[in-house]
Image (cartoon, rainbow, N blue to C red):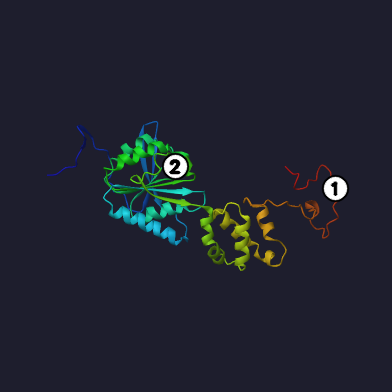
Amino acid sequence: MSKNTEFIKIGDRVVAKPKGADYDLIPGKVYDLSYDRWNEESILKENGELNLPAKIYSTTKDNMFKKRVISYFNNAFTSTTGVMLAGTKGTGKTVMAKILAKDCNLPIIVVDPEYPASRLTKYFKTFETPVCILFDEVDKTFRTDLMLDFLDGLQKTTKKLVVMTCNDLNKVSEYLQDRCSRIRYLRKYTPEDNLAFLDILIKDMGIKDIETVATYCKENIKLLSMDNIVSFLNEVKLLEEELTNNEITLDDVIEIMNIATKNEKQSTAGEVTVIDYDNEDDEDDEDFDFNDLNDEEECCCCAA
């Protein structure tokens, strides 16, 4: 007659088996790895599915990179495949990291920036399930000089795809660079890469004057991140009627947006109008005179 096991053996230690149902990590599902410093324990929690955009734009170079990484990981004799995605914010690093994680069809573990780098090796050595491990912005959040020890420590364990992103490759430890046996693939992104998607983005948003808007973006937007480009195009689409009727210009559209331009333009206040909230029935606004401004009236440029 069989009975449930009450104990488990770890090395030469015999300890009571933790209560709870057996669980296998699920391919494609996201798990967050954090560390409880108070109790000195790692915490792995389910966090649903990967959050990917509804429509993803990619180049031939992107597709080739993804294919080579996945192919090498599936066929390599080594247990760990390291990938570094480097470049300015908004250039597609995080999206590529998520695509690699999704297409490798492995459970995806996102490591919290506060997780102690010194404990990574010990934790992942216990894994028998192949996993994809994501580190976002390692140049800002992790001791990258300790990441080499982490990658070295994974070589003799089960297969793992380790994907890292960074904004500034110069801030990543020299011990991680030019070490193909640990970080096998390096993809560098620049804001100019997004220009390949510009025309199709404008077209997909239904903006009519594709050439004019595309040229304006290239000549005026300082940081051609996807965030800046899409935000500006959304605004152009919103104001397309006014632009068509020459009531405003593209300079007017970008002027009050939080987007830096290559040549900052001197703006003017424009015509002054007065809105009388105490007498909204008046059809005609009186001419504005600064001499009539009293303590109860404020212009928008002075109001706190």
Q: Is any part of residue 104 visible from this angle?
A: no
Q: Where is residue 209? Give x, y as percent.
A: 62, 67
User: Do the numbered discs 1 and 2 sit on residues whose CB atoms are within 8 Å?
Assistant: no
Q: Quadrant of the N terminus?
A: top left
Image coordinates of residue 48 in percent, x first then y, are: 40, 51
Residue drawn 52% across the image and 61% down it: 197
Disc 1 secondary structure class: helix
Q: Residue furthest right?
A: 291
Question: What's the amino acid at mark 1?
Answer: Phe
Task: Identify residue for label 2.
Answer: 138
Say which residue appears at 62% left-offset and 57% top-offset.
219
Q: Quadrant of residue 70?
A: bottom left
| Residue linked to disc 1 | 290
Neighbours of disc 2 within 10 Å: few (<14), some (14-19), many (20+): many
Residue located farthest toward the front when viewing the structure as drawn: 178
- Residue 186 sits above or below residue 116 on the image: below
Check the image and report above or below for 261 versus 9: below
Q: Amino acid at mark 2?
A: Val
Total numbered badges shown on the rendered structure: 2
Q: Residue at x 55, y 54 (%)?
A: 227
**Between 184 and 155, the one nearer to me in the picture:** 184
Of circles 1 and 2, the one toward us is 2
**Hey, which residue is sitting farthest left in the picture?**
1
Can residue 159 be seen? Answer: yes
Residue at the bottom extreme of this rendering: 208
Q: Is residue 49 left or right of residue 231?
A: left
